């Protein structure tokens, strides 16, 4: 574990912390993980605590049945008691950011599967009783609309938005909510300096094999070669080239 924290793990999102923490600090982190998560399961490792910004979490009790999947989220309102209706409203306003839809009776098509990295509606769990302002990250989760994509690039668009956009942002900037927290930050695919010298062959290699020491994992065990080639074609066409025409 010390080696993993120190050097990271190749082909995963686990980066090395040897440039961030000294040897003693790394040992302390590993000791804490082993004791708290693997041993005693201390209270302070649970998420909904005051230390994590959740004072008096019991005030959400009426939303628990929806978070736990005990009551389907799409059940008709007339089948809910007044308290359950309030619980669903609270769940939709405060809990859904992390718990997603929990359980539904009908999968339907109402739920957009596109990766959205930021807390929905700019929600902050530290303000559960108020509506917070719009998040500055939302603009980076808007997919660019590009005319004239080839069939391969269209395939790459779908694969990129479903898999890569979560870290690199839908607009390729890496400046979405998740990207802002990753260290090192995901590459800004739209930045000419960062993408200088990038070729489609090199990009395919990076997607396939990942980049050691970064949060860029290898996708060769997840995507087929033709899918990786399609993503690379889409990225080069939409983000790397400077002569794209956007609607």
Image (cartoon, grey):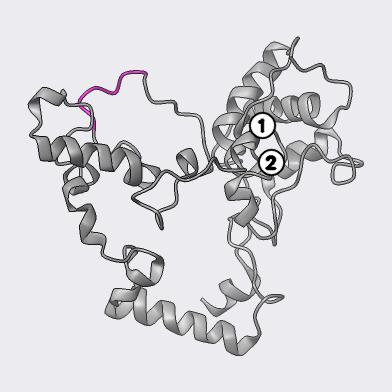
Main secondary structure of the magenta stretch? loop
Badge 2 marks a residue whose secondary structure is helix
Q: Is residue 128 above or below residue 104?
A: below
Residue occupying the point 58% across, 55% down: 12
Label 1 CA crowd tier, 10 Å (few <14, some 14–19, many 20+):
many
Who is closer to the viewer here, 114 or 55?
55
Say if the magenta span includes residue 172. Answer: no
What is the residue that sits farthest to the front in this orientation?
130
Q: Is residue 32 above or below residue 154?
A: below
For this view, does 128 lie left or right of residue 146?
A: left
Residue occupying the point 34% across, 75% down: 44
Q: Which mark is residue 228?
A: 1
For this view, does 37 lie left or right of residue 124?
A: left
Q: How far across and down, in percent of the image, does residue 97 sit?
A: 40, 44
Query: Quarter of the image containing the C terminus?
Result: top right
Badge 1 marks a residue whose secondary structure is helix
- Within the image, what quadrant is residue 33 found in? bottom left
Tell me the residue that label 2 is attached to: 207
Q: How far across and down, in percent of the image, does residue 170 sit?
A: 63, 33
Q: How far across and down, in percent of the image, does residue 118 sit?
A: 53, 43
């Amino acid at each position: 574990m010390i080696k993993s924290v120190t050097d990271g793990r190749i082909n995963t999102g686990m980066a090395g912390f040897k440039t961030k923490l000294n040897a003693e600090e790394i040992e302390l982190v590993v000791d804490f993980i082993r004791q708290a998560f693997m041993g005693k399961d201390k209270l302070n490792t649970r998420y909904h605590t005051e230390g994590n910004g959740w004072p008096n979490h019991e005030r959400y009790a009426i939303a628990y049945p929806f978070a736990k999947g005990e009551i389907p989220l799409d059940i008709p309102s007339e089948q809910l008691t007044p308290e359950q209706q309030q619980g669903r409203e609270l769940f939709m306003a405060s809990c859904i950011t992390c718990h997603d839809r929990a359980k539904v009776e009908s999968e339907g098509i109402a739920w957009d599967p596109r990766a959205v990295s930021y807390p929905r509606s700019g929600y902050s769990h530290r303000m559960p009783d108020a509506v917070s302002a719009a998040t500055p990250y939302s603009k980076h989760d808007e997919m660019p609309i590009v005319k004239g994509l080839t069939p391969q690039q269209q395939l790459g668009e779908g694969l990129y938005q479903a898999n890569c956009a979560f870290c690199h942002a839908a607009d390729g900037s890496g400046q979405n909510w998740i990207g802002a927290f990753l260290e090192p930050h995901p590459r800004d695919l739209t930045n000419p300096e960062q993408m200088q010298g990038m070729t489609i062959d090199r990009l395919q290699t990076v997607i396939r094999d990942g980049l050691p020491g970064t949060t860029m994992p290898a996708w060769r065990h997840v995507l087929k070669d033709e899918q990786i080639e399609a993503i690379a074609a889409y990225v080069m066409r939409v983000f790397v080239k400077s002569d794209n025409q956007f609607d």
